[in-house]
Image (spheres, rainbow, N blue to C red):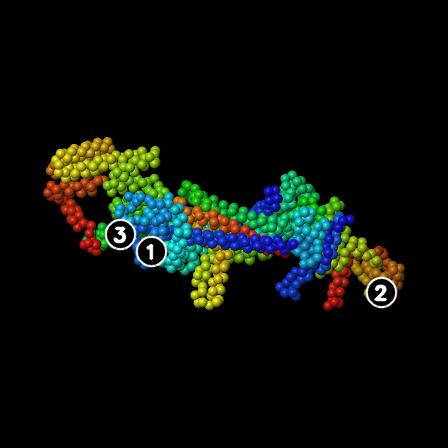
Amino acid sequence: MKAVVDYIRGPWCIAIYTWREGMRKKTLVGFLILSLLVIFGSNFMSSFLDPSSETDMELKLIKDICVTAIAIFGMLITVFISASVVPAEMDNKVIYTVLSKPVRRGQYLLGKFLGVQLIILINLALMGSLFFLALYARQHVLPTLLLWSIFLTYFSFLIVSAFTFAVSCASTSSVLPTIAGLFIYLTGTLTEYLNDVFTRSGQSGAFIDKLVGYMAWCLYNVLPNLARYDLKTQIVDRAVNDPPTDALIPWLVLMALVYALSGFLMAYIIFRRKEL
Amino acid sequence: MSVVIETKNLNKIYEGARRRQDLHALKDLNLSIPAGEIFGYLGPNGSGKTTTIKMLLSLIFPTSGEIRILGSKDISSAKVKRSIGYLPEGAYYPDFLRGEEILEYYGKLYGLTGKDLKRRVDAVIDVVGMSHARNRLLRGYSKGMRQRIGLAQALISDPQILILDEPTTGLDPIARKEIRDILAQLRDQGKTLLISSHELLEVELISDRVGILFEGVLQTMGTLNELLTEREFSIEVTGATEAALSRLAEKGISVEDRVGDKLKLRVAEGHSSYEALELCRAENLNLHSVAPRRETLEELFVRVVGAAEAKRRQAA
Amino acid sequence: MKRQPNIVVIVAFIATLALGSLIGRHVDQLRRAEAFYRWILAAAANERLFAEENPDYKDKELYDSVSSVAESRLPELALDTKVDQPGRKLSRLGRLAGEPDYADEIWNLARGNDLVQQRQSFLDYARGRKLQLAKDIQYAEAQAGGVNVFNLFFGFRKVAATFVWIQVDRYWHQGMLYRMIPMMRTCVYLDPNFVDAYLLGAWHLAYNATAKMPDTPQALRKWDAKHEACVGEKERYYYLAVDFLRNGIQHNPYNYQLYFDLGFSVYKQKLKDYVNAVKYLSLAVQQYHQVWVPRQLYICEELNGQYEEALAGWQDYIQRYPGTQSALDTAPRFILRNKALIYEKEMRKAREAAKAAADPQEAEKLRAAAEDFKQKALQVWDEMKEPFSEYRKSRLQAQEMAEAGRYMEAVGILEKARWEDPADFDDAADLIIEIKLAGNLPLSVSEKKAVLRKQEGETCPGMPGK
């Protein structure tokens, strides 16, 4: 136990420091402000609607727009922050001062990664609480189900974050990993397409056709499928016990954790003998 | 005296895309720095100083050869790293933090906590003379203050070894002097300092020993007394004609400096002072003074580097 | 020595990636099972409530297969007399649809090993767009065309649905009804869980769209085989609303609002079809629901002549929501009202039995019993002291008079009563016609028209058996 505490102490300091520094990044603050504007603005979307309508259509509007805004801006924040924490330190040479201290590279990475997660979580919490406030102002009930929705959103971000982080460890500037992160996100959401390629392949009987199909199948099975996390939209609507959602959530969380570990190990493989 | 930093046949090759593009940054480096000395690690830009330092800190890894720090081969171990303080060249420190907070952060990375941490932070702030600004945000710091904070973070764990990469670059003369004083003070406390620089005057003023690196090869290494010769001397004269000067030049007496009518003549190695004075008198020059002349580090540097370049040309 | 940990890390990396991929496959299986489960719910709701069949699709074939497996796996529940048609064979699966308490059982069936084959055919059919009720499958695996572009942008599909709805709303304000309907369908196609769209859409169709339409004369109405009714212009929209809500129920079988709107807003208020109103309101009550849902159910039961159920319902209501305004005020009134209505019903029954009785002694006994029921009813009405109770008293009196052949007096009483209680004007008018016809009294012009309408009956062109 003491060994674990000793091992984690350094990373924890780095994580807190990363968080404090990250929250000052201009792009990040920009995204946050934008998303907060969208969430706030969704309250005025109702001006498009018939004021006499009896059901609370505005509520649905606010929910959908906010969930989407949180997802999109959260993803952007995730990608930008995961792509930049390590390259930024390489760029301004802070990494030299840190790694020359008794901090192992694995510990350093762990600290940075935890810091990134802290930033993402706190941003989600900020967006989420404004969202809650917007809903509460209208409904006067706390939308606890939405907590689950944001919770799941975070786990899909966790996967994107881990792999973007791994790419960023191989790079010296944050531009490439940012593009890679967006690409990881897009690929993750579109892996179903690969499965579709597989089901349609082999029609011509040509070897290359089969090969492409087989490769698509392999990729489909290895890459994390982020579309699976779309479940969150079902949660927003559900009012009663929905057994499939209950069955899916723990598996989705587990999947995110395992893939995040895998992304982190990839980062470690890249970083452990990297010449700085 | 025990050897603190030692390298044996250390080589570093930065691999290019093709073999021809490989960069042999460090060739068979053999360094040995005993405890309690200030070692000036000199060389022009790109000669391999920073490469050596990064290898010492295991930020990069040697292609071949061996490094021992405090006798240990496992230089990335926490034990070794705890005894090293490092000030990188031109590092950035987050300007949203207070001076104190940055030191706390680095202190925690050394595993310092609670009272120990506070005591160390107070101590290093005192050493670098930043007590007046410890609660200010780094944003409001001058360049010199930042460099001092950098020095303070290197000192936070009270390390035996200090590795400083270009510690005075870009600072004004007063700040340089202050940093120099701090370093001398640290040496007096018994710490071993490795200072890399291309600013020779700085190093000359404080180093016990220097090593000159050029194109990855350690050209020479020794104490300043060993390396800087005192075999030349200079003569101050007035009333020289151009013809006289050219005749003197043929005999190995050259003009070093000229202020109005006053000339400073440099007498090359191999002439005795009498012989030189005789020559001057023969040309009817008015003698003002005769003084022995110690070689500057700059001259040594130019000499060593020049010789190395000449050797390379010859080889080519 | 330096190399070794690297290999360990690489092995760990590959292992976690493989584990992640395995979990991913499991999640995929669950999501397919989920799609299957949602289709089963829709198809079961269809079997129980609507019994619609479309030969172009494979829903029925697959459902029958699923249902036959489910028959031995699911618990048997007694038929719900309020919802299920007596005499119709209903599968266990069909019976359990819409009961949230059994959602877990259906889910376990959908994901379990018993239905491996059916699940596979479901996926194949869904991919080939052969399933009418599986429209909402968002998971591209089961979706024709492979990739759903909307998945790209998270819940974008839902936002799109919302914006389509704003367009629907705009069309409504511009009075473009014909444009609204396809847009409404697009909207719920994009987001099948958009309950408000179903509700508002049905409301537009059943109320707003028909507000300025004239009633269609019976002769001009057309037979609608699907809904088994003669429909005029207004009714066409009412049934569009019914279909829209049915679609909503299939995709959201556990949402009380859809059942409520179908039962109350459309069947009760617009179509005056109290049988169906009771059916859907009973289903609404079975879901998680608001306080006012059961109240409407009991009122519809009363309107449908199910006074005993209504009475039991109101009594239960007081138990369930003690201290509320409606439990203190409304429920006791309705309890009295249904009690009296039950007495009246018993009285009528006894009288009819007395008329039919061959044995005069028996008949006398029955008449005495009828009188007893009447007194009890009057006692309750006296207790109530409301326009309705006063009307009911007058009504009893008028019927008594008519029985005794004093038709003019009976009509007089009713004329007075219906002015005092306009809420029961129509009921009084019907009774007046009945009495006038029995007593051969002359009818007014509007009464003659009413009689003619009744003679025409509920028939229309195209109606089977005509």
Mark 2 residue type: Lys
Return the residue nearer the eye: C408 or C20: C20
Give the quadrant of the N terminus of chain C.
bottom right
Identify the residue at horizontal 19%, vertical 32% (top origin).
Answer: C372
Identify the residue at horizontal 45%, vertical 53% (top origin).
Answer: C28
Give the quadrant of the C terminus of chain C.
bottom left
Look at the numbered discs 2 and 1 and tell me whether their residues touch, using CB distance below 8 Å. Answer: no
Give the number of the disc on residue B113: none
Mark 3 residue type: His
Give the number of the disc on residue B251: 2
Check disc 1 and report the residue beneath it: C61
Q: Position of residue A41 (x, y in %)?
A: 44, 48
Q: Are marks 1 and 3 on the same chain?
A: yes
Q: Which tag is nearer the camera, tag 1 or tag 3?
A: 1
Left or right position of A154 against C88: right
Left or right position of A141 against C375: right
Q: Position of residue A107 (x, y in %)?
A: 60, 49
Label 3 resides on the chain identified as C
Left or right position of C185 against A269: left
Check disc 3 and report the residue beneath it: C227
